[in-house]
Image (tube, rainbow, N blue to C red):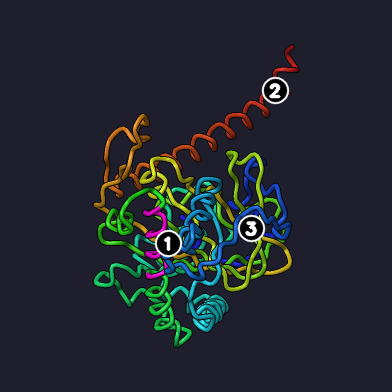
Amino acid sequence: MAPTSMKWDQNSLLENGFVRDEDERPKVPYNKFSNEIPVISLEGIDDVEGSDGVKSRRAEICDKIVKACEDWGIFQIVDHGVDARLLSEMTRLAKEFFQLPAEEKLRFDMTGGKKGGFIVSSHLQGETVKDWRELVTYFSYPIRARDYSRWPDKPNEWRSVTQEYSEVLMGLACKILEVLSEAMGLEKEALTKACVDMDQKVVVNYYPKCPQPELILGLKRHTDPGTITLLLQDQVGGLQATRDGGKSWITVEPIEGAFVVNLGDHGHYLSNGRFKNADHQAVVNSKSSRLSIATFQNPAPDAIVYPLKVNEGDKSIMEEPITFMEMYKKKMSRDLELARAKKLANEKEQDLEKVKPVENIFA
């Protein structure tokens, strides 16, 4: 189980299971930014009328998003209509929360299966190596399922600001899903309907500065299980993406006021593999802490996961329809099993290394 509170120092790094295997450690600096990830303006997204053979602004935006999803499964959006004041307030209050004394944060400790609140490293049980982060999780949709007792009440305004933030981002996410639906040749509500009763989770990540960032990850390599994720990040840098199975990485350049949009596994399956699920991780640094706010848009647990459209001559990338909860559990079990198998293999190799000198004596 991840520790509920700790000091972010050299002793913590070495004693609490944060050091990654060499093949998992960062390959690219946190601040060596790439411009490979498209930055797409949503200005005019509701303009559906073209003229004189010229595409409408919405069609142009759709083309850019489709290309980004086919190439990376990740892109950035600007001119999205979310008030800069709201973004600033959400970020400011989040930073203030993580500066609170440990006992204040631990009033919302979410260990032991509590739904929402504060934790260190990860809410997942059985992780073999820990992530260098603190986080707060809000289960924000469906609204009827909100448990405000699990929403931190300090700083004073954070609860109300988070509520406004989650509602605004739900609207923005649905707008992006409309464009993706149209790109697949479906009615614009198709992806939203496939989510049934859309679930939303807001996760606020705080990555403390680290004495040896070359040894650890702020957040391990993964793809998100849901439909899409909208990430607001500060200007420090640390989000990284790969599209070749982790052989090479790029650091996504932070843009003031932009959202990074990641396509998740659910979106990947609904598109029958046409759109990539973004393969990404977060790295840290020794100079400053970093903050990011991820809003996960997921289908309802009982929503059916299966391609919405299979083109003539193609096969479905899924053998059979399953529920999102079944898909999620399989993914988590597989990831944990792979991590455990790797750990056992490393331990076996270390044991063999210890035996070698003895073998040499009797050679």
Residue under the point 69% across and 69% down: 288
* Residues drawn in magenta: 171-182
Name the secondary structure under disc 1. helix
> Which of pointers 2 and 1 indicates the residue nearer the eye?
1
Q: Which mark is residue 252?
A: 3
Task: Identify which residue, 329 or 306, lies in the foreground.
Answer: 306
Disc 2: which residue: 356
Q: Is residue 172 visible?
A: yes
User: Is any part of residue 5 visible from this angle?
Assistant: no
Q: Amino acid at mark 3?
A: Val
Q: Which residue is mark 1?
A: 176
Horizontal arrangement in the rendering, residue 249 relative to residue 65 (left or right)? right
Residue 48 falls left or right of residue 12: left
Q: Is residue 329 above or below residue 137?
A: above
Residue 249 magenta: no
- Residue 237 — which label? none
Q: Amino acid at mark 1?
A: Ile
Distance, label 2 to label 1, CA atoms, is 58 Å
**Nearest the eye: 78 or 8:** 78
